[in-house]
Image: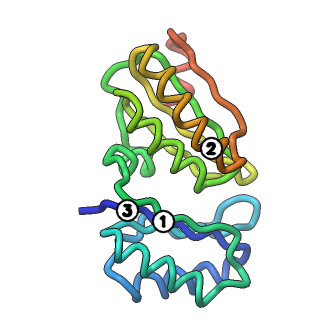
Amino acid sequence: MNHAIGLLELNSLAAGVLAADTMVKTATVDLLQATIMCPGKYIILVAGDVSAVQSAVAAGKAGFAANIISSLVLANVHPDVFPALRGAVAATEMGALGLIESFSVAAAIQAADAAAKAAVVQLLEIRLARGMGGKAFVLFTGDVGAVTVAVAAGARQAEAEGMLAGTAVIANPDARVWEQVL
């Protein structure tokens, strides 16, 4: 069972592929993503037990320190974060819509985790930097009170990292907005 997420963000595509290989060979982790992100960065996202994720991230950092932009090990991750990272969540209800936008992938993951832990909301997607100039965002739904609390909690987390780009709470989104968002 996955309890932790590890992330490396590198400034080199070649170093990124090599770091991903090093990380998965170092520890028993699931490779959630290893991909090119805008603008010319490489993101490696792994999950697993806390100690395995820590070992994998440490190995990636040690071998490619000159290429590391940022890194993250997040323990005790809310279980809803994993399907939201894959964008594989179908909305069970279309209540209020919450959005947290960040300047980094790591901040978006941390914000999503904080939001999910703060209130009863359904994480819909954590969109990571692809086509957004390195930004990332989190989408979730629930009743307006819960969404407001979740946005505030996630925003505090991203703001503490200096990475908050914006937030939104829409109490009753129009069906046409839902079509575009989902």
Secondary structure of residue under mark 3: strand
User: Which residue is drawn at the image coordinates 46% and 14% (left, top)?
Assistant: 144
Identity of the amino acid at label 3? Answer: Ala
Q: Amino acid at mark 2?
A: Ala
Residue pictured at 74% horizontal, 67% vertical: 40
> Which labelled disc corresponds to residue 4?
3
Q: Secondary structure at mark 1?
A: strand
Q: Are marks 1 and 3 in contact (CB under 8 Å)?
A: yes
Q: Secondary structure at mark 2?
A: helix
Vertical arrangement, residue 69 with respect to residue 59, above or below: above
Q: Which residue occupies the foreground of this view, 62 or 42?
A: 62
The residue located at (58%, 70%) in the rendering is 8
Q: Position of residue 46 (x, y in %)?
A: 43, 68
Judged from this view, the residue extending furthest toward the left is: 1
The image position of residue 108, as x and y in percent, is 57, 47
Q: Residues within 10 Å of mark 2 (few under 14, many from 20)?
A: many
Report how far apart the C-alphas of labels 2 and 1 lie in the structure: 15 Å
x 40%, y 88%: residue: 25
Which disc is residue 73 wearing? Answer: 1
Q: In the drawing, what numbered circle is on residue 158? A: 2
Cα distance, mark 1 to mark 3?
A: 7 Å
* Three-letter amino acid code at the position of disc 1: Val
